[in-house]
Amino acid sequence: MEILRKSIDAKELVTVDTAPKGTILIVDDSPTNVRVLFNFLRDAGFKVLVAQDGESALQRAEYAPPDIILLDVMMPGIDGFETCQRLKANPVLCDIPVIFMTALADAVDRVKGLRLGAVDYITKPFLHEEVVARVNTHLNLRNLTKQLQEQAEALEQRVEARTFELSQSNDLLRQSEAQLRTQTQQLEESLRKLQQTQAQLVQTEKISSLGQLVAGIAHEVNNPVNFIAGNLSIANGYVQDLLELLALYQQHLPTPPQDICSKIREIDWEFVQADLPKMLVSMKVGTDRIREITSSLRTFSRMDTTQKQLANIHEGIESTLLILQHRLQPKSSAPTIELVKKYGNLPLVACYCGQLNQVFMNLIANAIDALEEAIAQGQWAPEKQNDTPPTITIQTAVEGDRVVVRVSDNGPGISQEDCQKLFDPFFTTKPVGKGTGLGLSVSHQIVVEKHGGTLSCISRPHSGAEFTIKIPLLELETET
């Protein structure tokens, strides 16, 4: 195999010729990382291209589009996130799969990259088998998608040709159209299943990253907090003993030496004596609050087993709200997003807890996104004097044999045309870089396929939106 190669330290392209598996563009400013990936992928039979910054990568990709792009996050000039956003905004390059390269601890970067349109990530330091396996997986998915699209186009051309040829024979024409329609439907169904598989893959990575991050934080924070909380009560006892001892000293030595009197005035002993117990009480309140937060984080991130488990739906919602709490706070002069909770009396529900929490996360986050967009467009400008502030309402109830959870907002709403496509894989009403079109699709699968329930949306433009989850309670109780 002929190799045409320039120095990896240069800002030029590195080319490995005649690689039948496909072409990969590596975008990284680290020569060491490039060299490692270059060797992995060349030995695996790929054609490898290299760019050392985002601008160069965009030029290379537009000049000779690769089959897949490995993109580093931290680079000089435009970083990996902006590079990915520009790729997805280019109609010529938007379908090229992008795999981010991040450090093992950068779970937030991984989730942000997936939201911008990346299909996967690989972690540093690189593992040969993982890199090759992930590249092969997404290359195969892209090739299958292209094949199905080409077959669909070929079938459409055959329909047109056959229609012209058989225009004189209505019976034969109808038979041919029926056959071709059936084949087209089969191909569309295959394409839909492929898209669902790809959506599940990406969403699984997102859920895994978020779950690992949250569980890790909860675990690491919980141990030192328990240590502090355990010692606070002991410290409080010591402080009380010391205060009592000093009170005895003052009782039996009412006129201490001059240097002691000076120190008492210097430290403002009366204030310290009154404030120290209050400080310990405040510290205990703070540690109790941290313990509540870590408990909620563990509730949100708990891993699902192969069987449904009894769970408190309200605990799952509350743990989700805790994670999203920072997004409900006011930003500069923007109004606060108010939260209204109308909880009914729900029994324990047999479900996949972690997956159901992810559905709550998607619906509430989407409601926040809609309200933030409306705020940015001036819907709650002071001069408009709105009767109601931006509000998200969460309602739960038991209706017949079903547990019902409703998440609604008073934002800009959704058109009827978009409502019909909300749960399709990769459909999104958000701008490029703001959403992947996977959250509602995967949420629909979790509710319908995993729990035998329904997920629906009622909305009109300028009238907000309401998403309703219904899970059959009797069926779940029978399973448990």
Image (cartoon, rainbow, N blue to C red):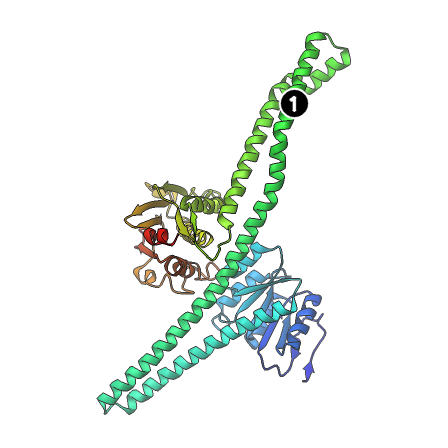
Residue 441 higher or lower than 283, as above or below: below
**In screen coordinates, is 188 left or right of 204?**
left
Query: In the image, is 14 to the left or to the right of 346?
Result: right
274, 5: nearer the viewer: 274
- Give 31 or 22, whichever is nearer the viewer: 22
- Looking at the image, which residue is at 52% across and 41% down? 293
Res 55 visible: yes
Visible residue check, residue 58: no
Residue 346 in picture, x, y percent from top left = 36, 43
Residue for point 32% across, 83% down: 180
Is residue 335 found left or right of 277 in the rendered image?
A: left
In the image: residue 257, left or right of residue 307 = right
315 vs 99: above or below: above
> How many badges with numbers are in the image?
1
Q: Which quadrant of the figure contains the N terminus?
A: bottom right
Q: Please say if 282 is above or below 471.
A: above
Badge 1 marks a residue whose secondary structure is helix
Viewer-nearest residue: 39 or 90: 39
Task: Determine the residue positioned at 63% across, 19% down.
Answer: 273
- Image location (x, y in percent) of residue 24: 59, 74
Q: Amino acid at mark 1?
A: Val
Q: Is residue 91 above or below residue 78?
A: below
Residue 412: where, in percent of width, then height?
35, 52
* Residue 49 percent location from the top left of the image: 63, 75
Residue behind mark 1: 239
